[in-house]
Amino acid sequence: MTNSTLPTANQVWGFYGTSSAFADADAAWAIAFPAITKVTVGSAEGVRDFLDSRHGRHFADDVHNGIHTGLGLERAIDAAITRWMGWKIDRNTAREHGIPKGLPYLTGFVGLYEIMADAQ
């Protein structure tokens, strides 16, 4: 496992592809990747796979909502991170994905993708 910023493996979908509709996707990736790594203490592979997933697409939608309200890109990403860290994994999500109940949403999903990367 590495702790550096990895490039997207999904330029069409996920966070990167969705970000290209409202911002410079490279710039968004360069801001979001290290910020998510820092707050979740996730591996680079886990963060990349999270951002490349459908959950990363939803995260990008949240960033877009922040931009729509007038936030700049960096502040919109920070606001989305704060929101996702404030949400907690509930019983249904824990049962569906195997993520421990009560973890912050962002930490839980980055951890899930990290485990999936380790298993491959």
Image: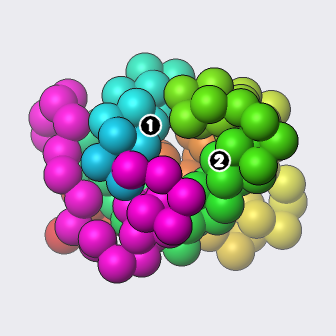
Q: Provide the residue designation for mark 1.
A: 32
Q: Specify whether 7 is left or right of 110.
A: left
The circle drawn on residue 86 is none
The quarter holding residue 29 reads top left
Q: Position of residue 41 (x, y in %)?
A: 42, 25
Q: Residue at x 76, y 65 (%)?
A: 93
Can residue 50 be seen? no
Is most of the magenta stretch helix, strand or loop? loop
Indicate the secondary structure of the residue bearing disc 1.
helix
Chain-order first, disc 1 or disc 2: 1
Q: Residue at x 77, y 36 (%)?
A: 70
The quarter holding residue 30 reads top left
How many marks can you see? 2
Is the Cβ of the residue at disc 1 closer than 8 Å to that at disc 2? yes
Which sits in the foreground, 90 or 13?
A: 13
- Classify 10 Å Cα crowding around label 1: few (below 14), some (14-19), many (20 and above): many
Q: Position of residue 16 (x, y in %)?
A: 39, 61
The three-letter amino acid code for the residue at tag 2 is Val
What segment is highlighted magenta in the picture? 1-24
User: Is residue 95 highlighted in magenta?
Assistant: no
Q: Position of residue 37 (x, y in %)?
A: 39, 30
State the residue lying farthest toward the top: 38
Q: Provide the residue designation for mark 2.
A: 63
